[in-house]
Amino acid sequence: MVLERYLADLALDSRSTHSRGRDIGSLNAFFHAVRRHGWDQSLPANATFYPDDFPRPDKLLPRALAEHVMA
């Protein structure tokens, strides 16, 4: 399916996780608008992205201060 290929290409994109997630969210909002306003009756109902389709956020570094800084 085209959406699966889009997600696969996006996974190889070098931009940040936030930017790639925003792109997926924007396209998903467009799909919802098409259905809501009836712009294209041929858009399949399963043409949507689910929470599992979004990239996982990057793990943040621990916020603890080093012992020598606390001293």
Image (tube, grey):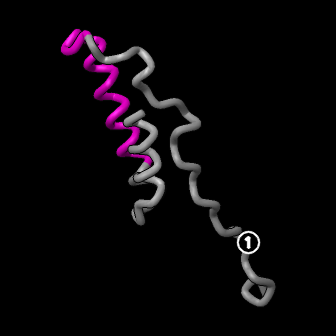
Q: In the image, is residue 35 part of the stretch drawn in magenta? A: yes
In what quadrant of the picture does the C terminus appear?
bottom right
The location of residue 54, given as percent across then percent down, is: 51, 42
Classify residue 3 as left or right of residue 57: left
Examine the residues drawn in magenta and state their main secondary structure. Answer: helix
The location of residue 56, given as percent across then percent down, is: 58, 50
Vertical position of residue 29 compared to residue 55: above or below: above
Question: What secondary structure is found at the residue carrying circle 1?
Answer: loop
Q: Residue at x 42, y 43 (%)?
A: 5
Q: What stretch is highlighted in magenta?
A: 21-41
Q: In the image, is residue 33 part of the stretch drawn in magenta? A: yes
- Nearer the observer, 25 or 40: 40
Where does label 1 land, which residue?
A: 64
The location of residue 70, given as percent across then percent down, is: 76, 82
The location of residue 43, given as percent across then percent down, is: 30, 17
Q: In which quarter of the image is residue 52?
A: top right
Q: Residue at x 27, y 13 (%)?
A: 42
In this view, the residue farthest toward the left is 39
Q: Which residue is drawn at 47% across and 54% down?
A: 11
Q: Quadrant of residue 46?
A: top left
- The three-letter amino acid code for the residue at tag 1 is Ala
